[in-house]
Image (tube, grey):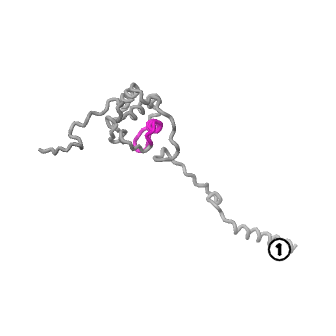
Amino acid sequence: MHERILMAGAILAALCASGCQSRATGAADMGAPPAVETPVGPIPGPGEPPPQAADPYAGNQVAVSEGRQLFVEYNCYGCHGGHGGGGMGPSLRDPDWIYGSSDARVFSSIAEGRAHGMPAWGTKLPQDQIWKLVAYIKSMGTPGEAAPPPPFPGPTPSDKQVMKR
């Protein structure tokens, strides 16, 4: 009997010694779930490849004009300026677009909204109208733009005149 107790003690000591040599390799081994990085909302900059959807109204002058009307009717100019030059919202005329300037990315910005003020219109507007808005926005600054802004009324920065009072 004494030998069995000694044998059980030796086995127990061997198991304890072997258990001390292994270490926990991660948070899950210690009872906590592993960390998971999940982005919330659209993330600016490069990342996943952009969607390949193209505007079915690109270059269609009737749709561009209708897009201009929608831009006014839905008060897009309230944030982006009367001709998309910017205001409280970003300019739609410059080449720098935080979330991408492809047709699909502009559609996504209108439909899903963006952080810091751009509301999501995808549940309020039919896709057809969003694509017409995209056609108008993409026409800005091109010869096909519907109702371009009037020319600057004063001297332009290229004028060499010196104005005297």
> Looking at the image, which is closer to me, 133 or 27?
133
| 47 up-or-down from 59: above or below | below
Task: Identify the residue shown where x is 44% and y is 42%.
Answer: 100
The question of residue 53 being in magenta is answered with no
Amino acid type at mark 1: Leu
Q: Position of residue 90 (x, y in %)?
A: 36, 42
The quarter of the rendered structure image containing the C terminus is top left
Residue sitting farthest toward the top: 62
Q: Is residue 78 left or right of residue 134?
A: left
Left or right, 10 with respect to 110, comes to right
Residue closer to the observer: 85 or 79: 85
Q: Is residue 116 magenta?
A: yes
Q: Position of residue 91 (x, y in %)?
A: 35, 41
Q: Residue furthest right?
A: 1
Which quadrant is the N terminus positioned in? bottom right
Residue in the image at 78% along x and 69% along y: 12
**Compared with residue 17, is residue 34 higher up or lower down, i.e. above or below?**
above
Q: Position of residue 134 (x, y in %)?
A: 42, 33
Residue matched to label 1: 6
Dot 1: element:
helix
Residue 122 in the image: state x and y as whole percent.
Answer: 47, 34
Taking 77 as reference, is 56 left or right? right
Which stretch is magenta?
Answer: 100-120
**Residue lying at 22% horizontally and 36% vertically, measured from the top left:** 153
